[in-house]
Amino acid sequence: MWENIIDIKEEVKEALEKGIPIVSLESTIISHGMPYPENVETAKVLEDIIRENGAVPATIGIIKGRIKVGLEEDELEFLAKDKNIVKVSRRDFPEVIALKKSGATTVAATMIISDIVGIKVFATGGIGGVHRGYSEILDISQDLEELSRTNVAVICAGVKSILDIRSTLEYLETKSVPVYVLGSDEFPAFYTRNSGIVADTRIDNIEELALIVKTKWDYGFNGGVVVANPIPEEFSFNSEEIDEVINKALKEAKEKQIEGKKVTPYLLSKIKEITKGESLKANIELVKHNTKVAAELAVKMTNI
Ligand code: PSU
Ligand code: MN
């Protein structure tokens, strides 16, 4: 069935056939995570970084009910600009496919499509998780459920402190999702390298990471992998400073009763507003860094 609605871009198709390393990219970050035009500019830069590091990029999105693995420039522009793009996670696929809507794929949705077409490595900014205050409102991202079942390695900059980081990591452990932190003893918190939480597994070498990920799937331990890549020092926020900003944004979201899938995009744009654009700069730099590491991992995985 899936082959009827998935369009794979020529260069991605060729890479899949020849075993050339591929890195997928999500589109929610474009449609709902960053403002225009920074979103589309970043999307293009990320594709260039993947190419420069020896892999083929596959940005995934949905255009009028068709799933695109590798977006053309005009499609990227459309997803970056249009105001009616659906934020698509696992549960939203039936609606957008059947009613031919256009959608941006979250981490969960990008993992699903990557896995179907055979892409093993995916780069993003931050994954969704267990939201703060979950004991009052049970808000847990579908990303975590997807990580427990779909065989894709997700390279991210950790988990933002708009979420309950400790609970997110506990949830991932419960769901048997390994979390590998690159070059640091501490799990990173997206805008900062520090979360105060010690990493269970620190990895300093991409070749070892490639070997571990391959071993996981070779022996049938199904499910995803979280690779947490701390933001480079020079772009990192001071923890206290960003925590104050996040607390302000969380307070406003609560007052305005922002709910469901609107929560994460609302908080991101509020944080950008309060930091006068500094958070967006950090966000762009950390995704670029993740994309480079993802390409390196994809290359190593094809060489094992
Ligand atoms: N974190 C970011 N930027 C984003 C997202 C997360 O820094 O754009 C997006 C990702 O697509 C992620 C989604 O999969 O938000 C999670 O949304 P929710 O919390 O509603 O599950
Ligand atoms: Mn949610």
Image (cartoon, grey):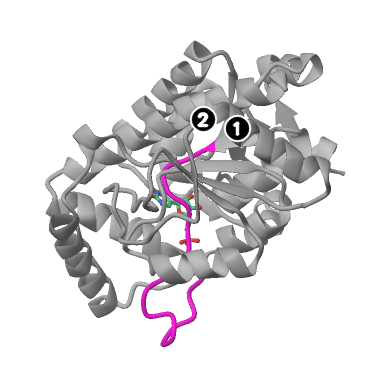
Camera-nearest residue between 16 and 259: 16
Helix, strand or loop: magenta stretch: loop
Would you identify the image quadrant in which residue 61 lies?
Answer: top right
Q: Find disc 1 in the rendering and name its residue.
A: 208
At x 65% / y 31%, what residue is drawn? 69
The type of residue carrying mark 1 is Glu
**What x and y, as percent, mark residue 211?**
68, 33
Q: Amino acid at mark 2?
A: Asn
Question: Which type of secondary structure does the marked residue at label 2 adopt?
Answer: loop
Which span of residues is magenta-colored?
123-140
Where is the C terminus found, in terms of image quarters?
top right
Name which residue lies at 61% across and 48% down. 225
Q: Please count the marks in the image.
A: 2
Q: Quadrant of the N terminus?
A: top right
Question: Mark 1, residues whose alpha carbon is within 10 Å: few (<14), some, or many (≥20)?
Answer: some
The numbered dot on residue 37 is none
In the image, residue 102 above or below residue 41: below
Is residue 71 shown to the viewer in this render?
no
User: Residue lying farthest bottom?
Assistant: 136
User: Can residue 61 be seen from the camera position used here?
Assistant: yes
- Measuring from the top left, give residue 283's x and y in whole percent: 31, 40
Q: Which residue is mark 2?
A: 205
Residue drawn at x 62%, y 20% is 299
* Element under disc 1: helix
